[in-house]
């Protein structure tokens, strides 16, 4: 029997999804599972997006442009991005099959195999997979729960720069920590990018989710590195359209967008109906976002405060996105997450969390952490926290209780 490639063997399983079989088995036993493991909002998709598909008169589902529909790219530039203070040309935009493909393409066209990208950790787990697919090397710079996962000192970044360093990768607001980088932190990164002439990749898919009056600052507005910036965006979270798989690569560097387009031509095009829905979603009324913002603020405030009341638990207050990294009094987060699904239930209910180890490149880190996605209604979050509290009491590998 032929063997798969070494690259295929190295591809990591998703820490967010690898426990799905255990959750399905728990449900089959009649246990209700509260999914705090994945950023799938329960917020309704805007009606304007749904109706655009329902009323689309096309009778042939045709190939679209490899860069994405021109009308969509123009509407993004002239309406959406201009509305959030970002001035770009439609030609700066390549529509991708989700933000995931966008980042994978960016890595592929900006970096050669063996090149290095510096990334603060913990970081979105799938970055590991994208790096393995594109052949690049992620060099993690550790941030800690003690500082609420703030940007590590810039001296740490500079210490890790080698002749193979080609890029810095950040997510702002951050998944999995919920940390929102300040203008000052971004300007420090800008100066480093300029000094070493690096690419700055930034995943900004959670732009709309900022709390306590905090303001999101886009890397596209950093002066002096216009040709270095590659921004990744997506409709998944903004409009609760995760299954639509529409994202974007945005860069003023025309060599980057030209190369990204060549990759786009090889995979032919982004999907037909999803672009129609995404274009219509740009017209989502402001009231939708106001309601969503209030809902997530309430969820965040409840779950962070409730978690911090559990003995031995520490959860920083996120300022963006809808995730929190939580330190638990446990010996091994992977073991704990599986145990909660296989061996524990409280009043017929249990919780599914994402083990923290999957968000670090260093296997020694994150063993007592889990990522929580507060994407459920407050009443469900209350039940989930109760299950988690009771689970921590019963878990055989508990510590500091």
Image (cartoon, grey):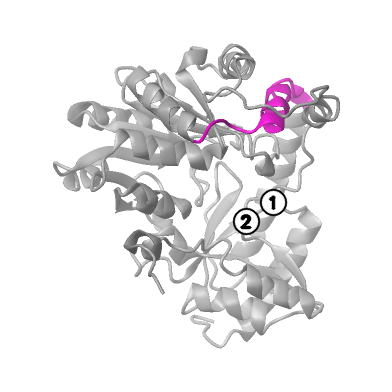
> Secondary structure beneath disc 2?
loop
Q: Which residue is mark 1?
A: 375
Select label 2 or label 1 by which is in front: 2
Instruction: Compare residues 158 and 80 and report the one nearer the observer.
Output: 80
> Up-down: is 83 above or below 259?
above
- Residue beneath the point at 39% across and 70% down: 2
Residue 134 as seen in the image, left or right of residue 335? left
Query: How far separated are the C-alphas under marks 2 and 1?
Result: 8 Å
Q: Which residue is mark 2?
A: 38
Mark 2: few, some, or many residues within 10 Å (few <14, many ≥20)?
some
Res 172 seen here: no
| Residue 3 badge | none
The N terminus lies in which quarter of the figure?
A: bottom left
Where residue 301 appears, as percent x and y from the top left, is 66, 50
The stretch of residues the image draws in magenta is: 267-287
**Which residue ends up furthest to the bottom in the rendered image?**
396
- Residue beneath the point at 31% across and 33% down: 110
The C terminus lies in which quarter of the figure?
A: bottom right
Where residue 394 appears, as percent x and y from the top left, is 63, 85
> Up-down: is 115 above or below 394?
above
């Amino acid at each position: 029997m032929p063997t798969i490639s070494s690259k295929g063997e190295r591809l990591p399983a998703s820490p967010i999804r690898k426990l799905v079989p255990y959750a399905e088995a728990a449900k089959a036993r009649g246990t209700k599972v509260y999914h705090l493991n994945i950023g799938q909002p329960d917020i309704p998709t805007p009606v304007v997006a749904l109706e655009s598909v329902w009323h689309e008169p096309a009778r042939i589902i045709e190939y679209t442009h490899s860069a994405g529909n021109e009308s969509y790219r123009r509407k993004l530039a002239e309406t959406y991005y201009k509305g959030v203070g970002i001035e770009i040309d439609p030609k700066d935009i390549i529509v991708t099959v989700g933000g995931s493909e966008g980042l994978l393409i960016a890595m592929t066209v900006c970096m050669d195999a063996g090149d290095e990208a510096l990334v603060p950790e913990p970081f979105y787990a799938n970055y590991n997979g994208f790096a393995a697919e594109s052949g690049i090397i992620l060099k993690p710079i550790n941030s800690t729960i003690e500082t609420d996962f703030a940007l590590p000192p810039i001296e740490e970044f500079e210490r890790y720069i080698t002749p193979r360093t080609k890029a810095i990768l950040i997510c702002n607001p951050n998944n999995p920590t919920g940390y929102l980088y300040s203008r000052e932190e971004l300007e420090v990164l800008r100066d480093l990018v300029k000094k070493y002439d690096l690419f700055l990749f930034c995943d900004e898919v959670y732009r709309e989710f900022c709390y306590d009056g905090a303001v999101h600052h886009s890397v596209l507005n950093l002066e002096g590195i216009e040709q270095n910036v590659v921004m990744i965006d997506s409709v998944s979270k903004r409009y609760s359209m995760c299954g639509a798989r529409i994202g974007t690569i945005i860069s003023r560097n025309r060599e980057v967008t030209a190369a990204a387009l060549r990759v786009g031509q090889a995979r032919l095009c982004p999907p037909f109906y999803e672009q129609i829905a995404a274009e219509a979603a740009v017209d989502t009324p402001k009231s939708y976002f106001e309601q969503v913002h209030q809902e997530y603020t309430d969820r965040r405030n409840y779950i962070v405060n409730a978690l911090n009341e559990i003995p031995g638990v520490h959860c920083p207050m996120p300022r963006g996105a809808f995730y929190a990294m939580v330190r638990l009094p446990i010996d091994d987060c992977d073991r704990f997450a599986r145990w909660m699904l296989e061996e524990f239930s409280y009043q017929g209910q249990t919780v599914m969390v994402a083990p923290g180890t999957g968000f670090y490149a260093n296997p020694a880190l994150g063993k007592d952490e889990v990522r929580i996605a507060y994407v459920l209604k407050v009443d469900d979050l209350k039940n989930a926290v109760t299950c988690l509290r009771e689970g921590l009491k019963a878990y055989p590998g508990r510590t500091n209780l």
